[in-house]
Image (cartoon, helix red, strand yellow):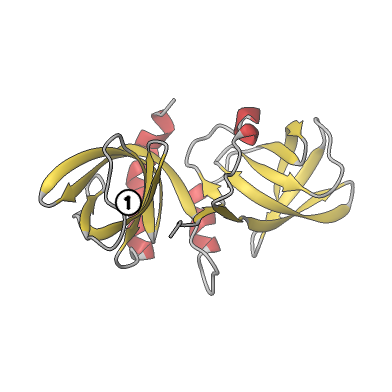
Amino acid sequence: MTETMMETTLYSLNEESPSPEQADRRTGERHLTLFRVGSVVIDKRRELCLIKNISAGGMMIRAYCAIEEGDELSVELKNGDPIKGRVSWVKGQNVGVAFHEPIDIIEILSTSMDGPRPRMPRIEIDCPVTLYIDSKPVQAKGCDVSQGGVKLQIAERLENGGKDIGVSLPGLAPVRASVKWQEDGYAGVTFNSLMPLAELVAWLEGQRGPVRKVG
């Protein structure tokens, strides 16, 4: 049975805004896209948009109205204040927005996860991750993390299915998990139980400095 991979809004602690090259990354047929809904206010009109990714310095949205490079606008997330910015590039429906001032991604993330939520946001990371498979440590690189699991870049072939493995993020005790999918040097690992939000936010706070140095 073929697993369907879920593509959701990606959060990043980096202060740089998304680049046009990110708009060229195509989603495969096996990806289910569930991007966060927002609204864009431009020329005193309000339109819906999808938030594809968001960093401290900007975001990439999928727009459903005419937007041109250089336009001034504001983007509102659900239950959030307007974030003002300027359009830095446009590629089809994909629009890159550079914020006038950096935002606190962890605060945005925490607010977005209050109350009922249909999906768990993914947060971009760049750090070593250790897997424990039959007590043998296997090294990988973390690409993004949520309360429900982690996406890895890994060279070793893993066994998909119900087999339990251990996953250890830097500074955290190993947790039990299973491999959900693996393709083109990447793998999706699902935690057997959700990581508590407070624990995830505290860990991200500790990663904030190292993440800002990446690139």
Quadrant where the N terminus sits is: bottom left
Q: Is residue 195 above or below residue 86?
A: below
Quadrant position of residue 59: top right
Q: Is residue 44 above or below residue 116?
A: above
Quadrant position of residue 94: top right
Residue 174 on image: x %, y %? 19, 55
Name the residue nearer the viewer: 150 or 81.
150
Residue 105 visible in image: yes
Does residue 134 appear left or right of residue 184 in this picture?
A: left
Residue 5 on image: x %, y %? 49, 54
Name the residue nearer the viewer: 155 or 65.
155
Name the residue nearer the viewer: 175 or 110.
175
Residue 175 on image: x %, y %? 22, 59
Q: Which residue is mark 1?
A: 203
Q: Residue furthest top?
A: 215
Residue 56 on image: x %, y %? 55, 41
**How crowded is the residue under tag 1: few (<14 C-alpha within 10 Å), some, or many (20+)?**
some
Q: Residue furthest front?
A: 1
Q: Is residue 100 above or below residue 182?
A: above
Q: Residue furthest bottom?
A: 116
Quadrant where the C terminus sits is: top left
Does residue 92 appear left or right of residue 120 in this picture?
A: right
Kind of residue at badge 1: Trp
For the point 32% across and 45% down, the residue is: 206
Residue 82 visible in image: no
For the point 84% across and 56% down, the residue is: 46
For the point 52% across and 47% down, the residue is: 11
- For numbered disc 1, what is the local secondary structure? helix
Does residue 148 appear left or right of residue 166 in this picture?
A: right
Tally the marks. 1
